[in-house]
Structure formats: structure tokens, C-alpha cells
Image: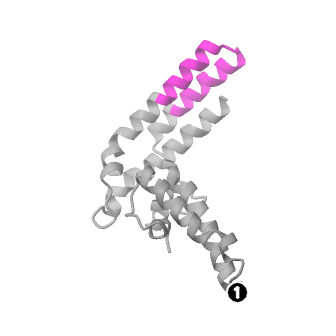
Amino acid sequence: MNYFQLFEIPVSLQPDKQLLKQKFYVLSRKYHPDFFTQENQMEQAEALEISSMLNQAYKTLQNQDETIKYVLMQKGLLEEEEKYQLPPDFLMEVMELNEQLQEAQMESNAEDLEKMKQAIANLQEEIYVPVKDIIASYNDETTTIEELQPVKEYYFKKKYLDRILATMR
């Protein structure tokens, strides 16, 4: 059973957060291990397993990056710890940003660091634009693997930029 089946919602790259929250509370009450203390060991273990999966699924589906990763993995387009080759022009742009960031950090220049954060935020928005419609209109039945390839590239680019932002905190 995948996370979407568990929540009984359609596969989506942008699950409805309110519906997800409602389903989570209903299922949390239904499968909470405390309600299975009088049941046999097998039923207790099953409730514990479902409860654990429910928490992990909720955490994943609440985060867009994690949801994208999960769907790509379900489709066989992404492997755990995959080393994806990003386009050279993107890597060059990021390398320049990294150099500017290092200079700003060495000089402890708060104004330049803020500009860097803004530049990275702008780049994140720029890489999101080409996949925005694919993500918004994703349909598990009709969206092709080829249509998901740009989403995979976006995922890796965003992950790369997020790591840079994490060093700035």
C-alpha cells in the first residue's frame, strides 16, 4: 500500500493539505496502538505498523519536495541516493553563486549575504516555472514518464540550491 492509498486520496504532486490533515486525524484515531491493547499480538503489530506508516506518509505528503521525491520513486524515476547529472550551465551559475557567497561570508558582509539569499530564491523560482504546470496538473493515469523528467531535474536542482541555503543559516 502506498501513501496515497493509505490516505484514500488521488496521487498528486500537490496533495490537498486540508483533506490530508482531516484524513490523518481520522486514520490516527482508527489505528492508534492504544485502541488495540485488548487485541491479539498480530493485530497490535499491524496497528503499530499502520500507525507508523501513517505518520511517515503524513510527514512526506505535507512537504512538496518530499512528495515529488516519493512520487518519482514510486514511478521508478528516482532511486535513493541517486547521483543525478545536472546541466553544466546550471552548475556554472551555481558555482558563481557559491564563489560570491564565500566572499560575502569571509567578509562577514550581511548585506551581500542577504543579496545572495535573494539571488538563490530567484533562481529557485526560475527553475520552478517550467514545471509549475506539470506539478499542478499531474495525473497519475495520464502524465507520462517523459513529462515527469523535467520534474526530476527540478527536484535535483532545488535540492542543490537548498543545500547552499542551509550553509547560509
**x and y, in percent, of residue 62 in the image:** 51, 51
Q: In which quarter of the image is residue 96?
A: top right
Give 144 or 135, whichever is nearer the viewer: 135
Question: Residue shown at 69%/70% (left/top)?
Answer: 34
Taking the spot 33% from the left edge, 49% from the top edge, the residue there is 136
Circle 1 residues within 10 Å: few <14, some 14–19, many ≥20? few
Location of residue 87 by image quarter = top left
Instruction: Please give left or right for residue 130 compared with residue 31 in the image.
Output: left
Name the residue beneath numbered marker 1.
40
In the rendered image, the vertical position of residue 57 relative to residue 128, given as above or below: below
Count of numbered tags: 1
In the image, the segment drawn in magenta is 94-121
Looking at the rendered structure, the secondary structure element under dot 1 is: loop
Q: Where is residue 98 in the image (x, y as percent from the top left)?
A: 60, 29
Quarter-wise, where is residue 142 in the image? bottom left
Q: Is 105 part of what is drawn in magenta?
A: yes
Q: What residue is shown at x 60% (from left), y 35% (from top)? A: 164
Q: Where is residue 36 in the image (x, y as percent from the top left)?
A: 67, 77
Q: For residue 117: magenta?
A: yes
Q: Can residue 85 be seen in this view?
A: no
At label 1, the amino acid type is Asn
Which residue is more in the foreground, 30 or 67? 30
Residue 6 in picture, x, y percent from top left: 49, 69
For residue 83, side relative to residue 105 (left or right): left
Left or right: where 148 falls relative to 159:
left
- Residue 18 visible in image: yes
Q: In this view, does 167 lie above or below 4?
A: above
Residue drawn at the location 65% of the way across and 19% of the way down: 103
The secondary structure that dominates the magenta segment is: helix
